[in-house]
Image (cartoon, rainbow, N blue to C red):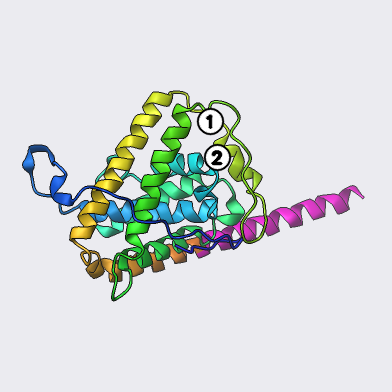
């Protein structure tokens, strides 16, 4: 997906996962697909774009990053947790709110959320001749993440101290400590977490199969996604300005105290 963040790490485009044809999925009561599935998909993709930026591409090759990514995806996406959104605005803003709650580096929050919304717009729109060129790999990436991390957990790999992240492929930079620290606590209830991962993986497989049968279904919602992006971009700019004002005020106060003591 070639998403970039401040360390310019690139993530490669995963191969589409092999999933059953949509007609083979059984919906409880043989009911038609809930039309709100479009908003659930949007919510999940925004969360995915955010976590991809947060992990900077390390999630595709590092076990610790994979584990953090899966946990964070569940934290960031109500859609993966079983919640239902009723429109695009709710889907986007709920994901952005949840994403903001896991971000533990205040100086980096500026624009990360809004960039994730813009990324998700590109993912859901695709290209004119191939509308699913980004969406299918994104869902496939999540399917692989949940599957591989479940294997890691069953092998007790994360029962011990989760290994340090690898160097960045592009910049040779290590994963930042504030990010690594969030993935060092082993799960309290491994079986429960495995169950959550399985449900999330199944949901992504369902969405991937459904999207293949409806390749252009998200195109009409792109204008609304861009509208929400602009709103969140404005919010992020306000947060950034507010953080800078606080940093400046702290610096001035600290400087003044130092001079008074001298």
In-image side of 174 versus 138 (left or right): right
Residue 8 appears in the rendering: yes
Residue drawn at (49%, 43%) of the image: 66
Residue 64 tag number: 2
Kindly tell me whether residue 93 is visible in this rendering. Answer: no
Q: Secondary structure at mark 1?
A: loop
Separation of marks 2 and 1 at Cα, in angstroms: 8 Å
In the image, the segment drawn in magenta is 237-262
Choose top left, top right, bottom left or bottom right for residue 246. bottom right
Q: Position of residue 99 (x, y in %)?
A: 44, 49
**Which residue, as the protein is rendered here, is positioned at the far right?**
262
Q: Residue at x 66, y 60 (%)?
A: 171
- Disc 2 crowd rating (10 Å Cα; few below 14, some 14-19, many 20+) is many
Mark 2 or mark 1: name the one nearer the start of the chain: 2
Q: Nearer the viewer, residue 107 or 4?
A: 4
Q: Which residue is nearer to you in this view: 245 or 178? A: 178
Residue placed farthest to the bottom in the image?
Answer: 128
- Which residue in the protein does label 1 denote? 158
Residue under the image location 33 percent in, 60 percent down: 135
Compared across the picture, whether 121 is left or right of 110 comes to left
Q: Is residue 220 left or right of residue 101?
A: left
Q: Mark 2 touching mark 1, by CB under 8 A? A: yes
- Which quadrant of the structure image shows residue 221? bottom left
Of residue 80 and residue 3, the one placed in the foreground of this image is 3
Q: Is residue 190 above or below residue 173?
A: above
**Above or below 251: residue 215:** below
- x and y percentages locating residue 11 in the rendered image: 50, 58
Q: Element at badge 2?
A: helix
Q: Tell me: 126 left or right of 66.
A: left
Magenta stretch: dominant SS? helix
Instruction: Categorize mark 1 by other alpha carbons within 10 Å: few (<14), some (14-19), many (20+).
Output: many
Q: Quadrant of the N terminus?
A: bottom left
């Amino acid at each position: 997906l070639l998403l970039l963040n401040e360390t310019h790490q690139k993530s490669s485009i995963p191969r589409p996962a092999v999933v059953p044809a949509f007609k083979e999925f059984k919906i409880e009561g043989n009911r038609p697909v809930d039309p709100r599935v479009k908003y659930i998909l949007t919510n999940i993709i925004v969360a995915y774009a955010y976590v991809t930026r947060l992990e900077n591409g390390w999630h595709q090759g590092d076990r610790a990053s994979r584990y953090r990514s899966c946990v964070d995806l569940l934290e960031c996406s109500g859609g993966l947790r079983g919640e239902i959104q009723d429109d695009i605005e709710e889907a986007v803003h709920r994901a952005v709110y949840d994403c903001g709650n896991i971000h533990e580096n205040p100086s980096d929050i500026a624009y990360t959320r809004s960039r994730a919304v813009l990324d998700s717009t590109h993912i859901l729109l695709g290209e004119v001749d191939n509308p699913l060129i980004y969406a299918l790999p994104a869902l496939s990436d999540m399917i692989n993440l949940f599957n591989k991390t479940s294997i890691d957990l069953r092998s007790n790999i994360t029962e011990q101290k989760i290994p340090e992240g690898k160097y960045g492929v592009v910049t040779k930079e290590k994963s930042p400590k504030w990010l690594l620290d969030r993935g060092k606590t082993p799960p309290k209830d491994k079986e429960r977490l495995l169950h959550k991962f399985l449900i999330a993986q199944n949901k992504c497989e369902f969405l991937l199969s459904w999207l293949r049968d409806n390749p252009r279904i998200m195109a009409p919602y792109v204008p609304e996604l861009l509208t929400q992006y602009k709103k969140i971009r404005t919010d992020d700019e306000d947060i950034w300005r507010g953080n800078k004002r606080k940093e400046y005020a702290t610096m001035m106060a600290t400087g003044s105290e130092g001079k008074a003591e001298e």
